[in-house]
Image: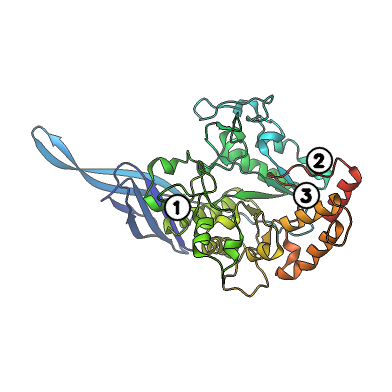
Amino acid sequence: MKNPELQLLIYGKNLKGSGLKINYPGVNVRQVHEVENANYLFVDLYITPEAGAGRFEIELNKTVPVKRGKTMIDQPVKVTRSYELKTRDKHPQEINSKDFVYLILPDRFANGDPSNDRFAGMADSVADRANPYLRHGGDLPGIQNHLDYFTELGVIIFWLNSVIENDQSQTNAGGAMRSAYHGYDFTDQYAVDRRLGGNEAYKNLIDAAHAKGLKIMQDAVYNHVGINHWILRDLPMKNWLNQWDTYTNTSYRDESVFDLNHGSVSDFNVQQNGWFVPFLPDLNHHNPFVANYLIQHALWTVEYFGIDGWRVDTYQYNDLEFMNRCNNALLSEYPGMFITAENAVNTAVSQAFFVRNNLYLPFKSTCPSPNDFVFYNAINAALNEKFDWGSGFNKLCTMLAQDIVYENPNLNLTFLDNPDQNRFFSVVGEDLRKYRQGITFC
């Protein structure tokens, strides 16, 4: 990688005081960090250009007190774990405004392998297509089986709702038990959910899609994790999460973030560091170990699976400097990579603030593209409101004229609906003429 630094997270029982040794050409141990929880070590490695692909052993040495008869003696203990440096071979494809995006919720698309519908050892082992709130059994092989369908539609990009493991129990919401089939409650970033087919199925899908000239855009969630995430069961340190004396929810107010010159510091702090909802613990991006963990996972995902772009969920709730650091790390390794930010906002100024823009403000985002919610609101007004001076199609005209605030408005990801909105065909009253107009404008 262009960045030769790598930080390993090592987890085990009572690792504090361990000596660590790696004997592999080109891999140098820079520093071993002990943290609040003795069960964690964070190890800084420096990978020189001379390092080749291959496996090496990480050796941990420690003395532990052991009772022998009536005497306590110090007994040496050695533990080794294997780690692999892989050959880089992934080259993300360019994503641009000519590409047509098709959003897929994997659990709801097609069931290519019924044997992975349920696993007894997972928190939610139910699959029931008759229940709209539970998992239905759709998976990655099911998508792969229908690649010709997408090419017939003229689709170029799959945007997949998150495929990462969500080992979450069902929750009672609105009087009904609901599964986390949507995929946004991560419990292990490095594992594609087994009920979707796992890591190998994801690699197979991406390779098959690329062979047909298709591209893959994946959801990134940096702001929070699922409450069952394995790290939360034994936190490395208290400030791994944003902590409050009493539970504090985010305000959801984007104005408090971009109003840098006149806004309230308190409002900014609540919006940025308050939790999205109580069951999605909020990650503390000011903690350097958290930041490294998330950024390295993003790089690993591109290099391991071969995805072509990112759609960043709940972008405005992430620490702004962290997001720039994450964007820059990806763009340094993969220049021109498409990264688009989800911000459910109502104004062009707010939307532009979170991406590369022409605004004169002390903070400048490095994200190339917004999910264009301003367009989404305008096209719905254009097709559903009466034509008048300040409504209907005039709102679309006003919105398009505000493109001057974006550095490159051609990178705006326009859309007609998304996972959080009603289907566009329903919104326009199932009027096929309006539907076609919307598709054409988009």
Q: What residue lies at 64% left-to-right and 64% top-to-bottom?
A: 355
Residue that badge 3 annotates: 416
Q: Is residue 333 something one can see in this rendering?
A: no
Spatial CA distance of label 1 from label 3 is 34 Å
Q: What residue lies at 82% left-to-right and 60% top-to-bottom?
A: 395
| Three-letter amino acid code at the position of disc 1 | Asn
Q: Is residue 142 above or below residue 36?
A: above
| Three-letter amino acid code at the position of disc 3 | Leu
Q: Residue 240 in the image: x percent, y percent?
A: 42, 51
Q: Which mark is residue 426?
A: 2
Q: Secondary structure at mark 2?
A: helix
Residue that badge 1 annotates: 242
Spatial CA distance of label 3 from label 2 is 11 Å
Q: Secondary structure at mark 3?
A: loop
Whether pointer 3 and pointer 2 mark residues with C-beta atoms closer than 8 Å, the reply is no
Between 236 and 203, the residue placed more toward the observer is 236
